[in-house]
Amino acid sequence: MSALRLLFLVPVLVLLSGAASAACETVEFDGAPFTTCRVDLAAEDLRLFLRDETGAIYGSFTRVEADLGPGRKLGLAMNAGMFHEDRAPVGLYIEDGVEEMRVITSAGPGNFGLLPNGVLCLQEGSAAILESRTYAAAPPDCRDATQSGPMLVIDGALHPRFIADGTSRNIRNGVGVEDGGQVLHLVISDAPVNFHHFARFFRDHLGVNQALYFDGRVSRLYAPGIGRADIGLPIGPIIGTVVDAAPAGG
């Protein structure tokens, strides 16, 4: 086992730099390491990112941060939903009130189409995860939104298609929202796990009743406060907090 992997197995709680910053913790749950970052939406600026002002898809955390402008940086970031080969969103995508892609409610191939899937809706100071058909029936006023699938936890229950001894194991990432909508958790597994294991982390360790899968294999986390900056092929939608950059020399 590498020294880097050993570090992931030691619980650690670190505040990312910035006036209001997410707390990231790496813990072991049922024999596997997970890194989870708690975002207080009343105090933190959480956004979705897809394209720059020219319309080009960012594809990486570094390109998003470079576009934030002087005095601002990413405090935390993660890939935030499935995407096509051109990195355009597979399902619903809204950024700053503008809808780029509509919600998809039909079943289909792959993890996205494993109904029920869901929508993460970000509003000012709060968030919600809604089953996609519930969203489509009465769309809330989301400032930002991304659709992905499958749902991991639905009203406190695991997705009905998950089985405890499922053999499909991947590095996976997703999002959970606490009741009341003020606290959101971004989570990545640091070892391959199946859906059942991943979903139980949200329900049984974090205690959230609504959680949504983002992706697997391409899953990446940017958390400089714990020395983490995962790299890989270009990605589609990105979720991240924006914080004040430390003054030069500070």
Image: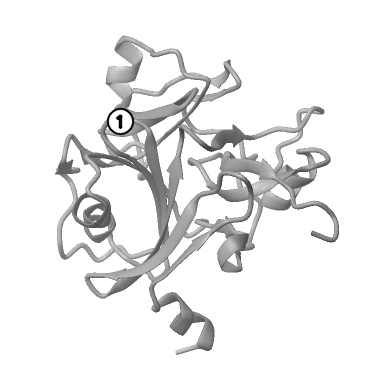
Q: Residue furthest front?
A: 250
Q: Nearer the viewer, residue 107 or 139?
A: 139
State the residue at coordinates (16%, 65%).
165
Residue 155: % across, % down: 17, 34
Q: Is residue 212 visible?
A: yes
10 Å crowding of disc 1: few (<14), some (14-19), many (20+)? few
Count of labels in the image: 1
Q: Residue furthest top?
A: 138
Q: Is residue 85 visible?
A: no
In the picture provided, is 238 more to the left or to the right than 162?
right
Q: Nearer the viewer, residue 124 or 104?
A: 124
User: From the viewer's perspective, is residue 100 above or below residue 113?
Assistant: above
The three-letter amino acid code for the residue at tag 1 is Ala
State the residue at coordinates (32%, 10%).
138
Residue 95: % across, % down: 59, 24
Residue 67: % across, % down: 78, 39
In the picture provided, is 16 more to the left or to the right than 68?
left
User: From the viewer's perspective, is residue 95 above or below residue 8?
Assistant: above
User: From the viewer's perspective, is residue 79 above or below residue 68?
Assistant: below
Residue 144: % across, % down: 52, 25
Q: Quadrant of residue 50?
A: top right
Residue for badge 1: 107
In the picture provided, is 243 more to the left or to the right than 11?
right
State the residue at coordinates (33%, 25%).
132
Label 1, secondary structure: give it: loop
State the residue at coordinates (75%, 52%).
246
